[in-house]
Image (cartoon, grey):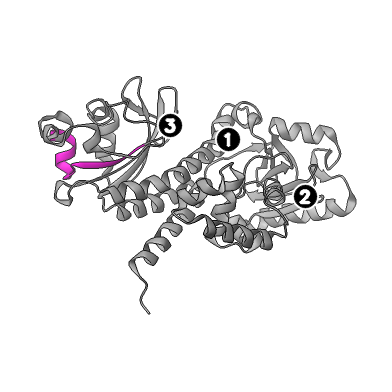
Amino acid sequence: MKKSDSARNVEAYEGLVDAIYQAAVDPQAWSTVLVRIADAVHSAGTTLWTHDFSCGGVHADGEAEKFRAVRFAPEALESYASHYSQTNVWVANEDTLKPGRVVTSSLLFPDEQLPSTEFFGDWLRPQDLFFSIGGVLARNGALAVKLSALRSRNKGPYSSSELQFLGRLYPHIRRACELNQRLESAAALERDAALGHGALSVTHLGIIVLGSAGRVLHTNRKADQLLRAGTTLVLRQGQLHAGSAGRDAALMAAIRSAAQQRRPVNLHLGDAVLADNFCLTLMPMPRAGILLSTAGIEASVVCLISTGSGQRAATIAQLRELFGLTPAEARVVRNLVNGESLAEVAQAQGLSRNTVKTQLHSAMSKTGTASQRAMIRLLLSIPAVREHGL
């Protein structure tokens, strides 16, 4: 029996949302996400970058990659960053580019005037591009994270259905970008020889970088506080240990497994529903990316520590693996943990409130919780992790 167009659209949307949350913790997965977005809105290519409204240019920290982009020639991206971002008539309309609002280029600048601009003649036309869709995902001062998809004039203007589709994805993309920024800050802190201070110090997660045998190489401020308390986790002769012998054996086994098998390991040290619960996620260091070493010992494992006061829900993939939730159920509970109401979740997902309630009750059953509040409290004890490294 063939699937209806509606069923295929729902399946495609759910698969794309799952891919976005994978990219949240695996930046290399953004290429797949951007390709799927381009295909979904019938575009030639998609870009994700940071625009600086103060100078009209493309912003990148140090040697960081200026763009995440698919189906654009590298020289076109470079010329945009070096010059044509200054002539882009679409981003000049700053008042219309409100964070979270998806717009089309036709709303930003009159289509009939575009052919007379330098931006079109020297940058868009050589690539057979004319229409754009996207906008600002998030903004901090003059800096704005922007997502754009572009296509040729022959494809016609973007439709209202394409605007709505991208609008439903925007909150997920924004959250993924925020998590990217937190995790990528570790690389910048390493370059400054200051891991454990600055950006990582304000996170609710304790972060400990370990050697393969459990030697502590770096910690952030939260982890320092937990280790100084000397209860659930302790530091002995430079090695990370659990406070009790039984838990210590489990911790050592988890560190070895993460280092040798290069797969994340979740470890609960305490009752999962108590406020003083410790949930540890041990993940292998990436083979390429953040490279740390101390006294000749190579960093091998990252340990994320969450207590009952954590405020970051687990990822879609993690909820599915730990509790057997469906993708739809996992998205519902993550949004509830992030402070959205059932009505807001239903509206964002394009579902009825009864459908969302059914998904919520199924998720409560699978997580073994008797109320929405208990389920949220449980999920807040689990830090968001990825499947293959930081």
Mark with earlier residue (3, 1): 3
Q: Is residue 45 left or right of residue 121?
A: right
Q: Is residue 360 left or right of residue 18?
A: right
Identified at 56% across, 58% down, the residue is: 329
Mark 2 and mark 3 residues within 8 Å of each other at the beta carbon: no
Q: Please provide percent x and percent y for residue 251.
A: 78, 52
Q: Please provide percent x and percent y for residue 325.
A: 60, 62
Of helix, strand and loop, which one carries label 2? loop
Type of amino acid at the residue the image marks with label 2: Val
Tell me the residue that label 2 is attached to.
Answer: 273
**What separation in Å lies between label 2 and label 3 (alpha carbons)?**
43 Å
- The relative height of residue 5 versus residue 338 in the rendered view (above or below) is below
User: Residue 210 magenta-drawn?
Assistant: no
Which quarter of the image is occupied by the N terminus? Answer: bottom left
Question: Which of 108 and 221 lies nearest the eye of the viewer?
Answer: 108
Type of amino acid at the residue the image marks with label 3: Glu
Tell me the residue that label 1 is attached to.
Answer: 186
**What separation in Å lies between label 3 and label 1 (alpha carbons)?**
15 Å
Residue 286 appears in the figure: no
Identified at 52% across, 48% down, the residue is: 343
Residue 31 appears in the figure: yes
Tell me the residue that label 3 is attached to.
Answer: 63
Q: Which residues are magenta?
A: 121-135
